[in-house]
Image: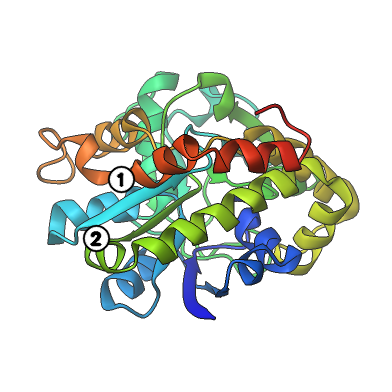
């Protein structure tokens, strides 16, 4: 069995394909011993990827793109399972509209984390400017519920299942980012080019297992709920089911990484990270593995096995 350690940044639903493929035995059937490894945030996942402590990362891609721009880390996205902004901007109890955010605060857990770049991408689209209309503040990481942070804010970006739990605690959805349909690389698989170049066969098998995990999660509700109970953020059954309904529609079943989704990240970083303005989005992805899976008929075969048309 080939050992592959896959880092992930939170117990949010974006890692469900990895968990599903592990528990359903897809990786093992392909001769892979895949170990999901949880870190506190995408920055730490990226550092572990750069250091060779993990071989792959399942997370939103801003940290990988930033590492490439700032440190020449040569990380690439090889699979894109969620290629648009799909989180929610939630207002604390008492904040129920965008207008009420003016002169207020929007919290991000840490500068450079995915929430930070989502806020940078979101604010201009809802008519707000950081530093003029709202102040972006670091909240620190939560203990317990995602909004139980060291420094409270008037609004925060929450990832499923968090928005559904927050609503039950009196928070309001100010923006469902799906409604904006903004390309942005969210749930994805990244790796170092040197590791990829030396392990192409192993990576191809891993991606096959990952795609099986996506299709199984999307089509087998009861198994998916079981996986989410085991691996994900602890939530009640109503929130859990709403999270599956959301994610099973968002996970792409032809999960190619896209130039447009990386472009969304680069636009958010424009003027804030050196080189973001002139970077070529295509340099941050390698879609060759997904193209090979498609050309060989493997992708169509996986889809058929799970009751989808080829």
Residue at the image position 54 percent from the left and 81 percent from the top: 1
Q: Which residue is mark 1?
A: 286
The image quadrant where one finds the C terminus is: top right
In the foreground, 57 or 179: 57
Q: For mark 2, what is the residue?
A: 193
* Number of other residues with Cα within 10 Å of mark 1, as a class: few under 14, some 14 to 19, many 20 or more: many
**Residue at point 42% right, 28% down?**
183
Quarter occupied by residue 182: top left
Query: Is tag 1's residue or tag 2's residue first in the polypeptide sequence?
Result: 2
On screen, 17 above or below 103?
below
Q: Is residue 89 visible?
A: no
Badge 2 density bin: few <14, some 14–19, many ≥20, Cα 10 Å: some
Q: 203 or 37: nearer the eye?
A: 203
- Whether residue 227 appears in this view of the structure is yes
Q: What residue is rendered at 77% in x and 64% in y?
A: 234
Q: Position of residue 309 (x, y in %)?
A: 70, 27
């Amino acid at each position: 069995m080939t050992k592959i350690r896959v880092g992930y940044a939170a117990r949010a639903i974006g890692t469900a394909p990895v968990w599903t493929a592990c528990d359903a035995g897809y990786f093992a059937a392909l001769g892979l011993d895949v170990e999901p490894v949880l870190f506190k945030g995408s920055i730490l996942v990226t550092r572990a990827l750069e250091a060779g402590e993990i071989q792959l990362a399942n997370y939103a891609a801003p940290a990988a793109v930033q590492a490439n721009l700032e440190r020449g880390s040569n990380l690439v996205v090889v699979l894109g399972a969620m290629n648009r902004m799909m989180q929610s901007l939630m207002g604390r109890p008492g904040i129920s509209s965008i207008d009420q955010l003016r002169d207020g605060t929007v919290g991000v857990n840490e500068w450079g984390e995915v929430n930070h770049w989502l806020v940078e991408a979101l604010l201009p689209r809802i008519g707000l400017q950081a530093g003029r209309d709202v102040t972006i503040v670091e909240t620190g990481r939560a203990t317990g519920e995602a909004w139980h942070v060291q420094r409270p804010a008037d609004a925060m970006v929450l990832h499923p299942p968090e928005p559904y739990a927050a609503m039950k605690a009196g928070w309001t959805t100010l923006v469902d980012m799906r409604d904006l349909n903004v390309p942005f690389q969210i749930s994805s698989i990244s790796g170092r080019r040197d590791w990829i170049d030396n392990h192409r066969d192993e990576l191809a098998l891993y991606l096959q297992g990952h795609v099986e995990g996506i299709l199984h999660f999307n089509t087998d509700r009861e198994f998916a709920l079981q996986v989410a109970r085991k691996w994900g953020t602890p939530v009640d059954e109503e929130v859990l089911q709403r999270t599956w309904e959301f994610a099973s529609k968002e996970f792409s079943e032809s999960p190619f990484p896209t130039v447009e989704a990386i472009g969304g990240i680069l636009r958010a970083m424009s003027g804030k990270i050196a080189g973001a303005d002139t970077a070529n989005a295509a340099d941050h992805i390698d879609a060759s593995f997904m193209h090979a899976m498609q050309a060989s008929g493997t992708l169509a075969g996986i889809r058929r096995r799970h009751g989808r048309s080829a």
